[in-house]
Image (cartoon, rainbow, N blue to C red):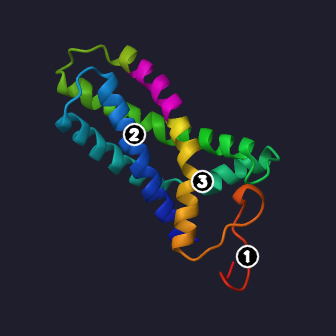
């Protein structure tokens, strides 16, 4: 399962970093390929570090469990997306705005730009995470020979063919 969690972290981090970097550079009004690439690489590195340090699955399982939510339900997926978004997006957004601030040599108001970007990025991040988590999970599980089962593609089935 650690292998699956690592692969999920890598794939989710890549997609989230790509989308947030693209969103951030486009909404800045200063879009360029170099600025997007720098933003994407920095965001990707941060996503990988966060994903390897923070046990996201454990945290989301505890939160949804404490709320009495059932795995695979829409409400559970929404809460899982919110938790992931709250963990990843503020750190990535802060780094991106700090980078833009440094590149502008302090010629932009840091706090107002950060707050506006954070609000927008949290909304965009939630939508992205909510939409892509299940397809990526299905891909990673299939790639690793684990069958999805249960209602709405619920938790993996533990059985002799996939050794639980």
The quadrant in which residue 95 appears is top left
The relative height of residue 70 versus residue 28 in the rendered view (above or below) is: below
Q: Which residue is painted at 52% across and 66% down in the image?
A: 140
- Residue 29 lies, in percent from the top left, at 27, 20
Mark 2 packing: few (<14 Cα in 10 Å), some, or many (20+)?
A: some
Q: Is residue 13 left or right of residue 29?
A: right
**Image quadrant occupied by the C terminus:** bottom right
Stretch of the chain drawn in magenta: 114-124
Residue 22 painted magenta: no
The first of marks 2 and 3 along the sequence is: 2
Task: From the top left corner, tell me how far across and down residue 71 is, in percent.
Answer: 74, 54
Give the camera-side residue of 68 and 74: 74
Proximity of marks 2 and 3: CB atoms separated by less than 8 Å: no
Residue 149, given in percent of the width and then of the height, sits at: 73, 66
Placement of 53 over or under 69, stated as above or below: below
**Badge 3 vs badge 1, beta-carbon distance below 8 Å:** no
Crowd rating for badge 1 (residues with CA inside 10 Å; few <14, some 14–19, many 20+): few
Q: Check if mark 2's residue and mark 1's residue have beta carbons within 8 Å.
A: no
Q: Earlier in the sequence, mark 2 or mark 1?
A: 2
Please tell me whether mark 3 or mark 1 is closer to you in this view. Answer: 3
Q: Which residue is label 1 attached to?
A: 158
Element under disc 2 = helix
Q: Secondary structure at mark 1?
A: loop
Residue labelled with disc 2: 19
Please tell me how many numbered marks the rendered image carries: 3
> Which residue is under mark 3?
134
> In which image quadrant can residue 156 be found?
bottom right
For residue 50, say whether it is visible: no
Considering the image in quadrants, where does the N terminus appear? bottom right
Q: CA distance from mark 2 to mark 3?
A: 17 Å
Label 3 to label 1: alpha-carbon separation? 18 Å
Residue at 21%, 18% (x, y): give it.
106
């Amino acid at each position: 399962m650690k292998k699956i969690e690592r692969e999920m972290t890598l794939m989710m981090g890549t997609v989230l970093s790509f989308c947030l970097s693209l969103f951030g550079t486009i909404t800045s009004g200063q879009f360029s390929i170099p600025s997007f690439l720098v933003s994407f690489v920095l965001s990707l590195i941060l996503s990988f570090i966060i994903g390897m340090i923070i046990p996201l699955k454990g945290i989301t399982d505890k939160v949804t469990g404490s709320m009495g939510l059932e795995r695979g339900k829409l409400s559970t997926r929404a809460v899982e997306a919110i938790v992931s978004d709250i963990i990843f997006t503020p750190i990535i957004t802060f780094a991106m705005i700090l980078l833009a601030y440094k590149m502008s040599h302090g010629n932009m108001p840091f706090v107002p730009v950060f707050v506006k970007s954070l609000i927008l990025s949290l909304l965009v991040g939630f939508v992205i995470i909510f939409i892509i988590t299940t397809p990526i999970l299905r891909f990673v599980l299939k790639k690793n020979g684990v069958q999805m089962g249960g209602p709405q593609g619920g938790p993996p089935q533990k059985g002799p063919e996939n050794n639980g």
